Image: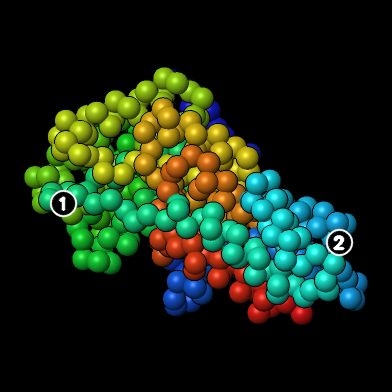
Amino acid sequence: MAIFGFGRKDKPATPADPPAEPATERPRGILDRLRAGLAKTAQVLKTDVRDLFKREGRLVDEPFLEELRAALIRTDMGPAAAEAIVADVRERLRARVVDPDVVLDSIRTQLLARLAPAEAGLKVAATGPTVILVTGVNGSGKTTSIAKLARRFTRDGKRVVLGAGDTFRAAAVEQLALWAGRLGAEIVRGEPNCDPASVAHRTVARAVEGGFDVCIVDTAGRLQTQSNLMQELGKIRRVIAKQIPDAPHETLLVIDATAGQNALSQAKGFKEAAGCTGIVLAKLDGSARGGVIVPVAEQFGLPVKFVGVGESADDLEAFDPGAFLAALLEGALADGG
Ligand SMILES: Nc1nc2c(ncn2[C@@H]2O[C@H](COP(=O)(O)OP(=O)(O)O)[C@@H](O)[C@H]2O)c(=O)[nH]1
Ligand SMILES: [Mg+2]
């Protein structure tokens, strides 16, 4: 069975070793970490929106609004959100002289209304282990996101077992094993190229018998268009559900925030064919187009559970629309000249 690479032209063929933990202490606080992670997108908004005001005494006229729309589109927030912001600015400010902060405030209000419904906590088991299945295309950040999730749980004193369900590449198993060792989690692995459903089965069995709190199962990357591989995810889910009826409690889709419009077809495909229940939007820190979270959150009724903002195990934040927008736009206000 072939797995086709996707969006990895700049990546080596084998998964990267987990990066070394940073020597310096990371910035404390959610907002600080989000700010650092969203700096590139914030920069686009800051620079582009402020550039609109370079001519002194500039009025909010149609050419201004067209330039504003183009700047918003450059963040990948999608035409609907961009149009709503433009309409709001037009309505409130037409033919008046405004300053950038008024426009940024409109951006915040409009985006908050769109992102708020996408906020949802992680579903956990009432009793017994919580089972999380992690899916996505090659290189989207699945294994790293699993490490980050494990870190959150172990920090809370939970016992975690990881399932090395990406059985196609030995290096993928090693990558997960390295993280498991580092995070103090147990790992269940199978023979190379064995059925990933059997690894999932054994991982859940280990979680139950060992009294673990959380069990997170990795999977090989696949495209939403590969129907046989999407069916394989269905099989993995059924095997898990046979052991624990309401499991997997979450089937997360990890999307690379730099994937552009393909992020949307991934969300659609994985929701429909693999029963995904939520999204982890990874690599926001590497993207100037973090606005893609808006159409991803809006179009498919899939909540955004977490955002990934770096390569270390601490670089995962529960998605909080207010904090997200504060990091994006307050940074723009504070740093602007
Ligand atoms: N900058 C950044 N890199 C990330 C993030 N998540 C994953 N990566 C990197 O993306 C690459 C692929 O990640 P990996 O977890 O192996 O992807 P997988 O193939 O989906 O399991 C690795 O080099 C990771 O370190 C993130 O949130 N930010
Ligand atoms: Mg992987």
For the rendered model, the colour scheme is: rainbow
From the top left corner, tell me how far across and down residue 62 is, in percent: 86, 56
Residue 56 sits in quarter? bottom right
Tell me: 234 left or right of 160: right
Q: Residue at x 31, y 44 (%)?
A: 250
For disc 2, does the CB lie below 8 Å from ligand 1? no
From the top left corner, tell me how far across and down residue 313 is, in percent: 40, 61
Query: Neighbour class for label 2 at 10 Å: few (<14), some, many (≥20)?
Result: some
Instruction: Name the residue nearer the viewer: 251 or 126.
Output: 126
From the top left corner, tell me how far across and down residue 280 is, in percent: 44, 50
Q: Residue at x 41, y 24 (%)?
A: 229
Helix, strand or loop at label 2? It is loop
Q: Is residue 300 visible?
A: yes
Tell me: 210 left or right of 324: left
Helix, strand or loop at label 1? It is loop
Q: Are marks 1 and 2 in contact (CB under 8 Å)?
A: no
Q: Is residue 283 above or below residue 314?
A: above
In the rendered structure, which amino acid carries the disc numbered 2? Asp
Q: Which mark is residue 126?
A: 1
Q: Residue at x 89, y 76 (%)?
A: 57
**Residue beneath disc 2:** 61
Instruction: Name the residue nearer the viewer: 32 or 7.
Output: 32
Front disc: 1 or 2: 2
Instruction: Name the residue nearer the viewer: 96 or 148.
Output: 96
Q: Is residue 112 above or below residue 227?
A: below
| Sequence-earlier tag: 1 or 2 | 2
Q: CA distance from mark 1 to mark 2?
A: 56 Å
Image quadrant for the N terminus?
top left
Residue 163 sits in quarter? top left
Image quadrant for the C terminus?
bottom right
